[in-house]
Amino acid sequence: MIHARFIAFLMTAALALTSFGCEAIDVWRAPVSTPEQYDKGLIVFYPGTANLHMEVVGFYYAFREAGIDLAIEEVQWSEYIETVLVPGEEVQPRITAKAKSEAARIAQYIYDHPNAPVTLVTYSGGACVRCRLRQICRPMRLSIGSF
């Protein structure tokens, strides 16, 4: 079991280093989910503005330690701190395009697993994609829960 202080230290160090443009330390990846976990349900996590995999580590282990045995995916929705550095009129169409591709991907998952729940978890800037997904999925009559 990973200690909460270690995760807090890891996240603090990672965010401090990435603040100085060092995204190379973003080495953590969520373990690949099993087909059995996908059959039970899907949690899709959209990280914050930095779009680092490490933004998921605390959530991932919290879900697992709480006994949640669903498939967990982490989706980077833009480039590293792109939404901070690129003007909004340039980055917004890319976020919308990512949300459209995510809606299609999630729709396929729901089609393949009709009784499995889908939950979207966002952190900070990741809510941008969640809001776009809601707009796109409503006409498709897709019901997606969220935190």
Image: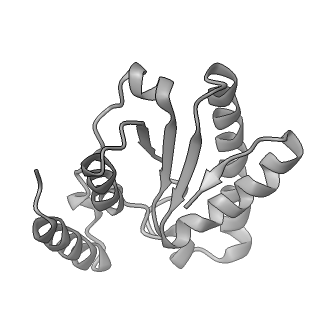
Query: What percent of the width, then of the height, locates residue 60?
Result: 32, 51
> In the picture provided, is 99 more to the left or to the right than 39?
right
Give the quarter of the figure containing the C terminus.
bottom right
Instruction: Report the front residue among 106 and 146.
Output: 146
The answer to whether residue 84 is above or below residue 105 is below
Residue 73: percent from left, percent from top: 44, 42
Report x, y in % for residue 40.
Answer: 48, 29
Farthest residue toward the front? 67
Q: Residue at x 36, y 43 (%)?
A: 68
Q: Residue at x 34, y 51 (%)?
A: 63
Q: Residue 140 sits in which quadrant? A: top right
The location of residue 13, given as percent across then percent down, is: 17, 74
The quarter of the displayed image where residue 111 is located = top right
Residue in the image at 64% along x and 34% along y: 105
Tell me the colour scheme of the image. Answer: one colour
Above-or-below relation of 116 to 143: above
- The residue drawn where x is 12% and y is 71% is 5
Is residue 62 left or right of 84 when viewed as pictured? left
Viewer-nearest residue: 56 or 88: 56
